[in-house]
Image: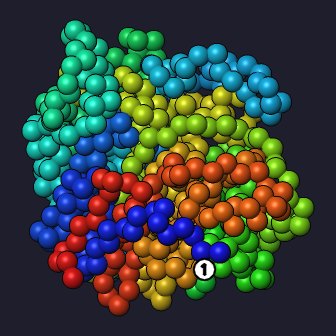
Amino acid sequence: MLMNELAVPRPKQVRSTAVCVAPDRLAAEAGAEILRRGGNAFDAAVTAGFVEAVVSPFNCGIGGYAATGVGFRAQTGQVVALDANAVAPAAARARMFPVLPSTDPDGYRLPDDRHRHGPLSIAVPGVLSGLLTMLKEWGSLDRKTVIAPAIRLAKEGVPLIPAHAHTWRTIEARAEGAPAPDFGAPPKLVPMPRLADTLEAIVHEGPDVFYSGWIGRLISDHVRKLGGLLTHDDMAAYHARVVEPASVEVRGHVLSTPPPASGGLTSLQIAALFDRLERAGKAGPAHDARAYEALLECAKVAWDERLRRVGDPSAMDVPPCDLLTSGHLDDLLERVLEGLAHPEPGRLVAPDPLKGTVHLAAADASGNVVSWTQTHGGGFGSMLMVPGTGVVLGHGMTRFEPRPGWVNSIAPGKRPLHNMAPVIAIADGKAVLAVGASGGRTIVNNSAAVVINQLILGLAPGDALAAPRLQCETIEPAVIESAAGEECIAALRARGHRLTEVARDAGNTHLIARDKGLWTGVPEPRMALAAAAGVPAV
């Protein structure tokens, strides 16, 4: 059964020698301009990341709690990865957010939103360090060049939808002790002069000014004044980490992603499990109900393991790489096969409704490619701006499991489990695919699904993104796009699966694919502002 092809618009692809893809046209074009000026893929990703931190304050900012990325350096043939996750303050404690029982015995609820908004939700933010570490390690341009587009936009003002413009102005007024903005017509452009000044300071003084320097002290002092746990020592000790990527082979491609506490390991597990099913004839072709059922059961098993066993590697019972070995994947496959033989709804492990992230990617004519994701967590993160800086802080503490005794439970100096899952694929010594997504827990499934669609089910890049999506974690109902078609959805229900139909998936996914020496950049077709920009267009 083919999908309803009218339901998802066709992606606006760009085929070029070099390309940048981002959720906002301004970021994609800024990254492409850096490529035109001779910068490499890492320079372009950093530029686009800084621009997104200005034009998309709902989703991310330089005070965002975390970022992570994976890239390929063509000259050396090396896959590199970066962990810019938040770190819990030294004063953090496992029971700092009390939990209450819920109607589901495996669930819980929280009595208020202090874990999500306000000073206690704030951990050491990683986005700024991540961007500048990527530039230092693998970029070729200076800070002034790559940050300049973001500074210009912050000074001139950025176009925000009315709700986001009002929230930004409200947070800013609260930080500066000014009257709340009126509820009249929002301005066409929202200027961010204090953020521009902060970015200028970072250009001149580097990341130290944000962590151990005067901006870092402003951040920690403000959070402490409001009752939070973050100290100047916590800020000064922070640094993004260059890490060994996690990898698995699928269809002659080596898939790589940053290791936990990122979500990419689970995406790789889902793709590898689906590959085993498809080779055994247990998964149908693209858009077939059997393919969706296979994906659903793979997701249930991988998510159950993710929520029970994956977190900061220091807290895991095995090294992350052990969860991608052939033997372990075979063990997981037995559970998937049992689910296919006897479909059941599963059970709740840990709920998570938060969404607020951007993903972008860049590739250059030399064959370098980078897949990069950065986030506040939920919209506008902690909802706190640091006075005099224009910096909104993400809410890293909300990414921890509030119940003690879990691998992702809160502990001082710990990095929380997050959903960001950038993935690249290497074949015959060259990078051929970069995938990533935004949208909370949908990120993990969508990164896996796009890899499956292209590398296993053989869809073209644009079709791999436009294909109807299905979301499931550990428990049904699964969420499926209506574009999958009545026949497909009816077949899944006839198998006993509980489904919720939606017109549009909650996540946004982008990819860059290489073929015959050229890159094809494909932005999310469900997202109006998403764009790809190339150098030169072909």
**Residue 470 appears in the picture as rendered:** yes
Q: Which of the 4 image quadrants contains residue 517? A: bottom left
Q: Which of the 4 image quadrants contains residue 183? A: top left
Answer with left or right where residue 108 lies relative to residue 232: right
Position above or below: 75 against 61: below
Category of crowding for the residue at label 1, using alpha-carbon neighbours closer than 10 angstroms: few (below 14), some (14–19), many (at least 20): many
What SS does tag 1 mark?
helix
Residue at x-position 32% and y-position 79%: 519
- The quarter of the rendered structure image containing the C terminus is bottom left
- What is the x, y in percent for residue 484? 60, 64
- What is the x, y in percent for residue 250? 61, 79
- The quarter of the rendered structure image containing the N terminus is bottom right
Front-lying residue, 69 or 77? 69
Answer with left or right where residue 32 lies relative to residue 484: left
Residue tagged 1: 456
Residue at x-position 9% and y-position 38%: 156
Q: How is the image coloured?
A: rainbow
- What is the x, y in percent for residue 394? 41, 33
Residue at x-position 78% and y-position 77%: 282
